[in-house]
Amino acid sequence: MSSPTIPELLPVTLLTGFLGSGKTTLLNQLIRHLPRTAVVMNEFGDVSLDHDLLEKMEGPMAVLSGGCVCCTVSGSLSPTLKNLYMARERGDIPKFERVVIETTGIADPAPILDTLLNDPWVRARFRMDGVVTTVDAVLGDAQLDSYFEATKQAAVADRIIVTKTDLANPAELATLQSRLSELNPAAEQLTAIKGEMDFSRILDLGLFNARDKTPDVQKWLNEQRYKPVSSTMLGKSTSTDDHHDQRIRSFSVIIDEPIPLAGLVLALEMLVSFRSEHLLRFKAIVNIAGKDRPTVLHGVQHVLYPEAELEKWPTEDHRSRFVFIVRDLEPEFVSRVLSDFAHAASVSATPPIPHSAV
């Protein structure tokens, strides 16, 4: 069976992290190691790239050594990405192969992910590859205690880069790494000293591999690292230990039987309409009743990305698998909504899966 045809989309990495956690130091090293990268920076930030990387300025854009491009967000992210892409197509700037968006230290990642997942023009040309979050090895634990922004940045990450490990007390570093594992069990933790690391480890984090365009659901979903909440359509829950950060929970829901599409739509509409601010991130591979191929879903808060139907199941396991990262929301409630609405729905009703809140 042939692999699915995936449009040639430019991968986008969202680089976030709290104030002083080393985002720009990491970024400076990244564009030295990965030429033909476009960097989008928030204009309200107080960060700057190394002067020796700058070759010339073109309005809000800077052409960097090695074929990189840097620009600042002017207004909203959508027009910035559009201007960057059109300049690339016209040949005004080097033909970059990837985009890194660096946020300010107190930024909420959700609105940026919203744009990347929901803007039709943007998602027709770019794909969300992953969220990379830097955490200060020395100050990170205190920042997680004091600032919810720092906690949320770590919670939604696909990769967590612990910086300044050479300056940290080993015992305190171990405590921080354990805490981050509790907060976001699916995110691989890497370390960087003065911005140096293996940058290949933060690429190709999304559903589709950039090299061969085939889906890697197991890596993308990584549900085996989440604590299970239910394993059947009855919504039976298992006990879970309290997380160190009580307001944020990460968990998986596995449903054995195929799910009627109408029931899944109602469940997602319920969660998105009434609990969107609590849904930090969500991914799923779903066995829809009446379909032979799996459906992939993911979203951020009130935005659900348009569903994708894969060519085939990645393994012999055809159960529906959901992973959630939530704030101030009981896992058992989410599990119950999924199971109850799926059971109550009529199999004959087949509305489309919603792409945003009602």
Image (tube, rainbow, N blue to C red):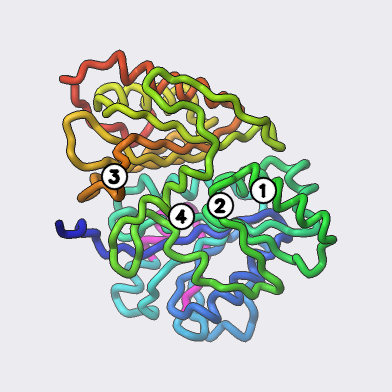
Judging from the image, what secondary structure is the residue with disc 2 in? loop
For marks 4 and 3, give the CA distance: 40 Å
Q: Which residue is mark 1?
A: 180
**Is residue 60 at least partly visible in the picture?**
no
Query: Would residue 76 be counted in the magenta stretch?
Result: yes
Q: Which residue is mark 4?
A: 77
Left or right: residue 7 versus residue 341 is left
Nearer to us: label 4 or label 2: 2
Q: Which corner quadrant of the image does residue 160 belong to?
A: bottom right
Task: Tell me whether circle 2 and circle 1 mark residues in contact (CB < 8 Å).
Answer: yes
In the image, the segment drawn in magenta is 68-83
For marks 2 and 1, give the CA distance: 9 Å
Judging from the image, what secondary structure is the residue with disc 1 in? helix
Q: Earlier in the sequence, mark 2 or mark 1?
A: 1
- Relative depth, front residue between 81 and 355: 355
Residue type highlighted by circle 1: Leu
Q: Quadrant of the C terminus?
A: top left
Left or right: residue 199 versus residue 95 is right
Q: Residues within 10 Å of mark 2 (few under 14, many from 20)?
A: many
Q: Which residue is mark 3?
A: 316
Q: Which corner quadrant of the image does residue 261 belong to?
A: top left
Residue type highlighted by circle 3: Glu
